[in-house]
Image: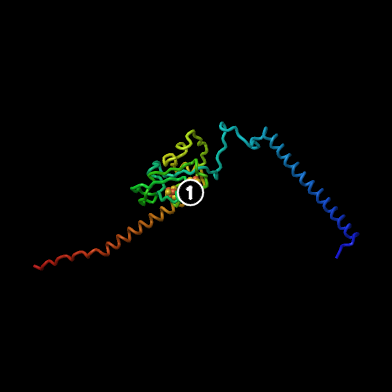
Amino acid sequence: MRTPPEAASGTTRRCELAITTWGLHHGFMLGEGIVKGLAETARNFIGSYVEEDRLTTVQYPEERLPAKEAARNFPFLVFDGNDPHAGLRCVACQICEKECPPQCIYIEKSKDKKPDYVGKPQFYPAVFDIDVSVCMSCQICVEVCPFEAIKMDTEFELSNTDRFGGLLLNKHQLAKSNEAYHKIHPTEAAEVDGRLSAEKAKAEAKAKADAEAKAAAAKAAAPPPPKPALIPAT
Ligand code: SF4
Ligand code: SF4
């Protein structure tokens, strides 16, 4: 059915009125947003001359902002104690090497073993290299490591004139102490320490229980002591 001309023109007028009202209202609101934004910019600009925390930039490299705890750049290898070789947590399982998307980790497993943090003999990386010119800082190596051995660093001043050799970091360059890890990511490092300590205590309790069970079994299997010889009566 066709709409009568009078009805159609009334509807059109109502629509035009509604559109005009909407346009005026939202136009004002859009303008209000721009004015608020400009006022905030002006407040920060003028305020930066009198209030330190309104400065959004620092004069790098003379001035540096402390790195955020959640910041990350390239991976490093954690070692416990003072000896980077003896305390290196990495057991050369090569999981991170397989999972690294751009394949920038290269590991060669040792022939011999050394004790890990619970005293269990484990292999270690004879070679552990990361090409940081290829690394994309995805942190997948950290996520997949079962030994809390690789973590993300926040160091970013790594520019080098040697594009190939200078950015290929070996295990000596990658090794950082657990204390350094605590400085970089204190919350995360404390949580890891707690977990490793619990695992160590559990392993020690199990070793002690196993030793006691072994000693009891050996005692039970031992032949009874010989009976003392009878002394004939005189
Ligand atoms: S952060 Fe990502 S790209 Fe870099 S070494 Fe780890 S897995 Fe590979
Ligand atoms: S860093 Fe972790 S995942 Fe990678 S080889 Fe060492 S122990 Fe395995």
Any part of residue 178 in sight? no
In the rendered view, tell whether residue 229 sits above or below residue 122. below
Label 1 packing within 10 angstroms: few (<14), some (14-19), many (20+): some
Mark 1: which secondary structure?
loop
The residue under label 1 is: 100
Q: Position of residue 175 (x, y in %)?
A: 43, 42
Indicate if the residue with disc 1 has its beta carbon within 8 Å of ligand 1.
yes
48 or 227: nearer the viewer: 48
> Considering only vertical position in the picture, is 118 above or below 153?
below
Q: Residue at x 74, y 42 (%)?
A: 36
Three-letter amino acid code of the residue under disc 1: Cys
x 87%, y 59%: residue: 8
> Could you tell whether 87 is left or right of 25 in the image?
left
Total numbered labels placed on residues in the image = 1
Quarter location, residue 222: bottom left
Question: Can you say which quadrant of the picture contains the N terminus?
Answer: bottom right
